[in-house]
Image (cartoon, rainbow, N blue to C red):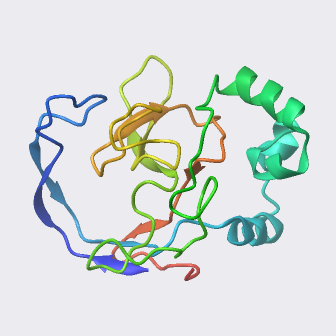
Amino acid sequence: MANISGGRLEMGTRAADSRDGESPVREVKVLPFRLDKYPVTNSIFRDFVRAEKYKTEAETFGWSFVFQDFVSDELKSKVTQRIEGQFPDGDTAEDGYHGISSVAAFPPQNSYGLYDMMGNTWEWTSTRFPAAQPTYVLRGASWIDTLDGSANHKARITTRMGNTPDSASDNLSFRCAASLGQKEKAEL
């Protein structure tokens, strides 16, 4: 985990086309914390599930996007449309990857040595998103988002949206964070 120093910072964007709480720019105070250098991978999550006997969404709902490469395109299309709606038709793979890239496929994006902070997968946060039902902030955009927002959302560091905790897709992930002083369980 990387140590992130606390302090005051400006959060948000001044972009005229901001949405979903990206603006206005506001000053916020952040306490020091620790953040995993990488998003949690499928293999790390599998080890957690086995060790903690955690019941996954696949066991609860009978389906998970983690297994999408092992089912027919017809079934994937039916489930995707029922759960998430239509996705863009094309992934140009100009970055060398179709869909998500491997963890650490690209160099760290900041001086803390954190990888995949934007544009690979949306990352869950513990921040509530204003909505009628329990909804949490997803941040950072994903591989189906573009710079101009023509495919879905604009891929920029301030991009955020809300989603319900029961949502699942191959473009959602999370990384572990801890307040300083809390004992960390495992290093990725």
Q: Position of residue 27 (x, y in %)?
A: 8, 48
Nearer to me, 26 or 116: 116
Q: Position of residue 62 (x, y in %)?
A: 88, 38
Q: In which quarter of the image is the C terminus?
A: bottom right
Nearer to me, 125 or 149: 149
Q: Where is residue 68 in the image (x, y as percent from the top left)?
A: 80, 46
Look at the picture and state if 131 lies above or below 25.
Answer: above
Q: Which residue is pictured at 44% across the width and 32% down the height?
A: 162
Nearer to me, 87 or 32: 87
Q: Which residue is pictured at 42% across the width and 75% down the height?
A: 182
Q: In this view, does 85 lie to the left or right of 23?
A: right
Q: How many labels does the image show?
A: 0
Query: Looking at the image, which residue sits at the far top?
Result: 132
Nearer to me, 170 or 101: 101
* Occupied quadrant, residue 59: top right
Look at the picture and state if 179 lies above or below 60.
Answer: below
* Occupied quadrant, residue 178: bottom left
Q: Where is residue 120 in the image (x, y as percent from the top left)?
A: 50, 56
Q: Which residue is pictured at 21% across the width and 28% down the height?
A: 17
Q: Is residue 45 left or right of residue 70?
A: left
Q: Which residue is pictured at 31% across the width and 48% down the height?
A: 156
Q: Is residue 7 left or right of residue 19?
A: left
* Occupied quadrant, residue 138: top left
Q: Quadrant of the N terminus?
A: bottom left
